[in-house]
Amino acid sequence: MKQQTFLFKGLSRRRVEILDAKTKDKLCFLDKVEPNATIGEIKSMFHKSHPQWYPARQSIRLDPKGKSLKDEDVLQHLPVGTTATFYFRDLGAQISWVTVFLTEYTGPLVIYLMFYFRVPFIYAPKYDFTTSKHWVVHLACMCHSFHYVKRLLETLFVHRFSHGTMPLRNIFKNCTYYWGFAAWMAYYINHPLYTPPIYGEQQIRLALIIFLFCQIGNFSIHIALRNLRPPGSKTRKIPYPTKNPFTWIFLLVSCPNYTYEVLGSWLGFTVMTQCLPVAFFTLVGFIQMTVWAKGKHRSYLKEFRDYPPLRSPILPFIL
Amino acid sequence: MTAPGTSKAAHSDVAPKKKKGPGALATAYLVIYNVVMTAGWLVIAVGLVRAYLARGSYHGLYYSIEKPLKNWYSFIPIYVRLLSRVSGIVPSSVVLTGFQVMSRVFLTWAVTHSVREVQSEDSVLLFVTAWTVTEIIRYSFYTFSLLNHLPYLIKWARYTFFIVLYPMGVTGELLTIYAALPYVQKTGLYSVTLPNKYNFSFDYYTFLILIMISYIPLFPQLYFHMIRQRKKVLGHVEDYSKVE
């Protein structure tokens, strides 16, 4: 009889205590927790006793300074005894990725149009509500608007996010960046004293082709990445080229969405408008995306033993 | 903004970290650097005093130390700190150190050197004096720390003088920038106007005003940080002596 009790230990209810990671104060004690409970469920239980800490802002770990446990981790598979001790850190107010993306992309769309239509108080009063005489300025407006509308639609219908939320302060940081740059670029492109590209029509046409090519490319990559992941899941798999030629770049690059974004869309826009602030925005974006691409590339390498060795993070063979 | 003796960088830039001290060679290199910098700022201090005694007034003293200030004491720290960081000798806060050095270079070159008319302003002397006294104390502090023989007086001076020197330096810097404004506007110095083929413009006058405004959020932060550091570094020593 005693042996049988020992074997059934795995089925017995556990106790969970949650301590503050910094002060080690006992914050919560949960009795009779099912061994197959997930961290996500434990977070919900903790939330009930501490309503100010909704699950998204809880970081639960085994060690005060350790990594956060994932919501999917199951209690009985963790290295804890019948009484599990977890440490809690408050991640601060959280906001959903979708909300952040929608806000940060709507801004540039609206702001650019305000400059395009020469809303009062931006340029000299005699220019209010006039339109530029250069057709490239109209083209640029269409491209810029198209780009952000595409991003908004992708946020709503295409992207599948790993994390639900990010810290609240990010929205201020991100919006300042996107909105600020959009205003800075739009100011010059739609300025009454704007100078069109030196090489005229040829330059604009070439730039437009590059821009459109890379918009399609970037979109193809987003679709390919979405299809790697079943709806509502957080699985991670190695992306591979599909039948769509725009995805063949996966052979050489880990994050071709960034490649298309920088090399194509924004470089194209820079050439199209021949505007230094746009070049600057492209450069800053390139630096940021390179950092992200390198990070992603590194986590691919860590997670998958058979990761294709030919691939570079963002630029084939270079970076 | 320079802020004499200020900033988190001031502690972490070329001073050894407590946990992992530099090796013997690195220590020697750092000691030499700090001794040279102390000596350098002493040269400026001596230059200022001598010129004052010779002229009988403090007007135009900038010219007597212009060369060492510009050529030696803006760029040497940049190169040495860059070298230190690249070679990994001193793990320092890149952003804050860079910020402090860049702001000093900015004041020296982009304002004082570029706008000749402000060079005879008294405000220039104000910040040069503040920087000089601060740097002499600071580099001696680092030198002695590296040699593990830090006299309490130096430590006390480093964490006390800033109370007066920081506002003094900031005042001098702001007044200098303010004095430069009319000349910048008149001559369009460093400014680019439309139309041009790069579709870009830059108004140095507005830029200087924005720099001045940036002192408002930045100065109190750095100043109160130093005050907190002072409590931490000098505070417990005073408590200890009270117990005695």
Image (cartoon, rainbow, N blue to C red):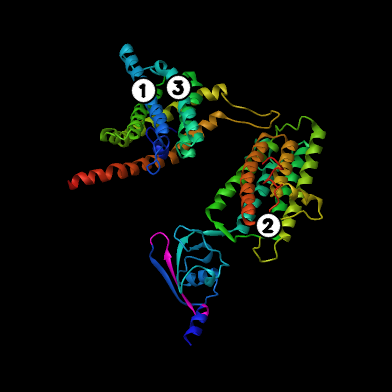
Sort mark 2 into few (<14), some (14-19) or many (20+) by Cα contacts within 10 Å: some
Residue plotted at (30% across, 44% down): B231
Helix, strand or loop for disc 1? helix
Of B179 and A55, the residue lying toward us: A55
Per the rendering, the mark at residue B72 is 3
Q: Amino acid at mark 3?
A: Trp
* Vertical placement of residue A206 versus A82, above or below: above
Tell me the magenta residue range. A10-23
**Marks 3 & 1, CB-CB < 8 Å contact:** no
Of A138 and B96, the residue lying toward us: B96
Could you tell me which quadrant the C terminus of chain A lies in?
top right
**Marks 2 & 1, CB-CB < 8 Å contact:** no
Helix, strand or loop for disc 2? helix
Whether residue A5 is visible here, answered yes or no, is yes
Instruction: Measuring from the top left, give residue A49's x and y in whole percent.
Output: 45, 72
Residue plotted at (54% across, 32% down): B206
Q: Amino acid at mark 1?
A: Ala
In primary-sequence order, the first of circles 3 and 1 is: 1
Q: Amino acid at mark 2?
A: Thr
Q: Is residue A163 left or right of residue A27?
A: right
Residue marked by disc 1: B39
